[in-house]
Image: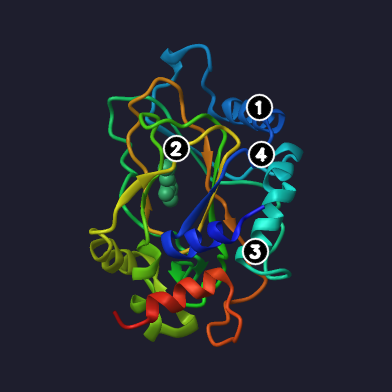
Amino acid sequence: MLTDDDVETFVRDGFVHLPGAVPADLVDACRAELWHATGCDPDDPATWTEPVVRLGGFATPPFRAAANMPVLHAAFDRLVGPGRWVAPGGIGTFPVRFPSAQPPGDDGWHLEGSFAGDAGEPRVSIDSRGRALLMLFLFSDVGPDDAPTRVRVGSHLDVPPFLADAGTAGRPWFPLCGDVVPATEGRPEVTATGAAGDVFLCHPFLVHAAQPHHGTVPRFMGQPPLLPTGTLDLSGTDPTPIERAILLGLQPS
Ligand SMILES: O=C(O)CCC(=O)C(=O)O
């Protein structure tokens, strides 16, 4: 259960860490499926030939159960609001990162795209159409050398001014990243380390990045969106924590 302090941390920093959100038996079942899908042999590092293998969405019963643990549903209610999110049908995508001397080639800073525009291009809007949260599900223990996701603490607060004039149509994701990545350079950086079964719930505007793997054990992490039932209401009298953070980011400094 999220405490009031956890909620304030989420509003201020842009994420909250839920240790042990997914029990070990489910983690093990999911990781076994993921290993199989990589085509690599867990016991033979000679088969780990790429720095990253990207896997799509998984909707088998262990993944659906992992994504819908009661502790997560309670946190979704607290951060997004009751009735305002869609129960996940599974978990994806998975950038599985292997120890490697080769650069992964996908470790640039960015925020996530939220919805597709008319031409299929990824876009982001101030009312966060299409995305209530970014979630990071750890399916392996992730220490500092194991390619933990890098996060710019509080960077979500710098994004709203770049979206405010674009309304619900939002802006294309790529040029938006071109604005917010330099604007968040001064933010402190932390990494999403933790144990298998931990989940990080992140504000949809949080700026983050992958990094190379310098450890010995492959990193399994899924980064699904939480889908909203509608758009955010930034003019209501009782804003949710997601909305409060956006309103905070829009205040003149
Ligand atoms: O692998 C990671 O740590 C993060 C990957 C990521 O942010 C992405 O693929 O969008």
Disc 1 and disc 2: Cα gap in Å? Answer: 18 Å
Query: Is the residue marked by circle 4 packed among few (<14), some (14-19), or many (20+) residues within 10 Å?
Result: many
Vertical position of residue 143 compared to residue 222: above or below? above
Mark closer to the observer (1, 4): 4
Secondary structure beneath label 2:
loop
Q: CA distance from mark 4 to mark 3?
A: 18 Å
Distance between the alpha carbons at the discs numbered 1 and 4 = 10 Å
Asked if residue 131 shows in the view, the reply is yes
Q: Earlier in the sequence, mark 4 or mark 3?
A: 4
Q: Residue at x 68, y 63 (%)?
A: 77
Q: Which label belongs to residue 16? A: none
The mark that comes first in sequence, 1 or 4, is: 4
Label 2, residues with CA under 10 Å away: few <14, some 14-19, many ≥20: many
Residue 53 image point, x, y percent: 46, 34
In-front residue for pair 34/1: 1
- Mark 1 → mark 3, Cα distance in angstroms: 28 Å
Q: Say which of 182 and 5 sits in front.
A: 5
CB under 8 Å between discs 3 and 2: no
Mark 1 lies on residue: 28
Cα separation, mark 2 vs mark 4, equals 15 Å
* Among the two numbered marks 1 and 2 on one chain, the one whose residue lies closer to the N terminus: 1
Task: Provide the secondary structure element on which disc 3 rests.
Answer: helix
In this rendering, the count of numbered labels is 4
Q: Which residue is mark 3?
A: 78
54 lies left or right of 67? left
Amino acid on which disc 1 is placed: Asp
Q: Which residue is mark 2?
A: 193
Horizontal placement of 204 versus 106: left or right?
right
Q: Residues within 10 Å of mark 1 (few under 14, many from 20)?
A: some
Q: Which residue is mark 4?
A: 22
- The residue that appears at 51% across and 68% down in the rendered structure is 116
Q: CA distance from mark 3 to mark 2?
A: 23 Å
